[in-house]
Image: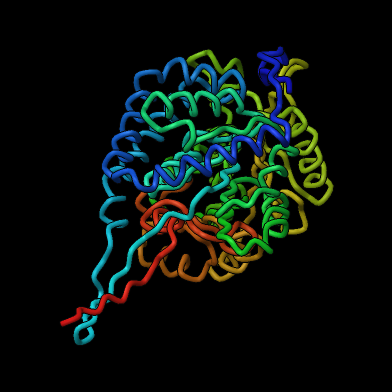
Amino acid sequence: MQIINPATDKLIKSIDEDTEKVVQTKYQLLREGQLKWKDTDIFDRIAAVKKFSELLRENVDSLAEILTAEMGKPLSQSRDEIKGACKKIKFFTLESERYLSGKNVNVDGNTHERIVYDPLGIIGNISAWNFPYLVGVGVFIPALIAGNAVLYKPSEHTTLTGLEIEKYLTLAGVPNDVFQTVVGGANAGRYLLDLPLDGYFFTGSNKTGRYIAQRVADKLVPVVLELGGVDPVYICDDVKSLKETAAAVSEGCFYNNGQSCCATERIYVHKDIYHDFVDLLADETNKLVVGDPLESKTNQGPLARKIQKGFLNDQIADARGKGGRVVTGGNPVGEVGAFFEPTIIADANHDMKVMKEETFGPVKAVMKVQDDEQAIALMNDSDFGLTASVFSSDHNRAKLILDRVDSGTSYINCLDRVSAYLPWSGRKGSGIGSTHSFHGIYAFCKPRGIHERMLN
C-alpha cells in the first residue's frame, strides 16, 4: 500500500497490508488478552489512558506533521485536533468509573436488585480519515476503559497516524494483546467482518455503513454506525449581525476543507436578508487561503483524496445546469496535489445534487426561503439527519424550529462542534447508536441484572 502526500503527490511510504491470516492472528492475541484486561482494576485502565493522553500532548508537533503529510489538513488544524482529542479523553477518564460502577436499584423484600456493566469483549473499530484522533478516541478510549480489547483499523488514508496511536497506547501501558492495529484498505476491513467480534463500530460513508450492518447482522452483536450528513443551517431574518453570522457559517462550511460529517452543506436564508447574506458569505469565503498545509497562513489544504475533485466538479456542473450561480470558487487549483477552491453556489434548489448528496468538500449551496415553515420543510427534506443549525436573535424561535427538525444534534447560533458530554448520533441515513456522553460509555458494555437474595 502506497501512502501519498495529497499536497505534493509524492510517496511518503510503502507499507505491507495485513493478510487475512495476519488479521486472524491479531484477533487470537486479543481473545487471550481481553480476559486479563477486563479483570484489571478500572483505575489502572484509566491510568493507562491518562498516560496516553499525556504522550499525545508531549509529542503533538511530530504527530501533527504525520497527520498533515498523509491527510493534508493544515498543520495548525492537526495540532488542534490532537489537543481536542486529549480534551475528549479527559471526559472519559473523569466520568467512566462513575457510570461503569455497579448500581443498586431496588430492594424487594429480602432480594436486592443490582445492575453491573460487563465489557462486550473484542470490538472492531473501523475508523475515519478526516479526524482520526477525534473520531478514534470516541471509540477505542471508552472501549478500553470498559475492559474491552480493540481491533482497530484506521483508514488507509491515515495509516501512519493509526500506527502512531497504537505505539503510544502501548507506551502508556495498554498491553499489545489488548489493542492491535489492522493495516490495509477495503479487504482488511472485510477480514474484520468475517471474525467473531463482539461489536462493530464504524465511522464513514452511508454506503459502507449499510454494507457492514448487513454483513454482520447474523452475528447479533452491537453495531454502531457514525455515518454522513448533508447538514443544514437556517439564517433567520432577525439576526443582529449578518457579518458575524456569515463568518461563523463560513467556518462551519470550510473547516478541514469541509471534510467533516457535521460540516455545514445546505444554507437556507430568509428572503429578506438573502442577497446581503450571500454577499457577506462570499466575502468571508474569499478570505480563505488555499495552499501548502505546512504554511502558517494556509487554512485550506488539499483534499485528502484526489478522486474527490471529479465528484465536486460534477456537483458544480449539475448545480449550474439547474439554475445555480457560482458566486465564488468553483475550480480545482493547480496540477499538483488535490487542491480545490472554496466554492459558494447561490440560488440553489432541491433538484440539485449538491443539496441532496453529501459533498464532503469545499462546495456549499445557499437557498432562499420565504419563512420558517418552508425552512423546516426543506431542512427535513433529506435522507440524512446528523446535525441542524439555526441562527436567530430569538432563542425561543430557534428552539421551536429545531424541535421540528429530525437530527441527532441541534445547534443554536453555532455549528460544527462536538462535545464529549453530549451524545453523537445520527437519524435516518446518518447512522445508528451513539458515541460520546454516558451513552457512548454504555455502548461498550453488556448490562447484567443481578437478583441477590439474602438467606437466613
Q: Residue at x 43, y 27 (%)?
A: 170
Q: Relative to 370, is 229 above or below?
A: above
The residue drawn where x is 68% and y is 19% is 15
Residue 135 appears in the rendering = yes
Q: Is residue 451 left or right of residue 236?
A: left
Residue 389, image x, y percentages: 49, 55
> Which colouring convention does the figure follow?
rainbow
Which quarter of the figure is the C terminus placed in? Answer: bottom left
In the picture as drawn, the residue positioned furthest to the left comes out as 456
For the N terminus, which image quadrant? top right
Please tell me whether residue 186 is drawn above or below residue 214 in the rendered image. above
Kindly identify the residue that appears in the image at 48 percent across and 26 percent down.
77
Q: Quadrant of residue 338?
A: top right
Q: Position of residue 25 (x, y in %)?
A: 63, 35
Query: Residue 10 occupies which quadrant of the picture?
Result: top right
Front residue of this view, candidates 369 and 133: 133
User: Is 127 located above or below residue 429 in the figure?
Assistant: above
Name the foreground residue: 301 vs 269: 301
Depth check: 354 or 64 in front? 64
Residue at the bottom extreme of this rendering: 109
Residue reaching furthest to the front: 456
Horizontal and vertical percent position of residue 455 = 19, 80
Q: Residue at x 31, y 50 (%)?
A: 96
The residue furthest right is 321
How many numbered circles does the render carry? Answer: 0
- Whether residue 242 can be seen here: no
Residue 192 relative to residue 389: left or right: right
225 on left or right of 345: left
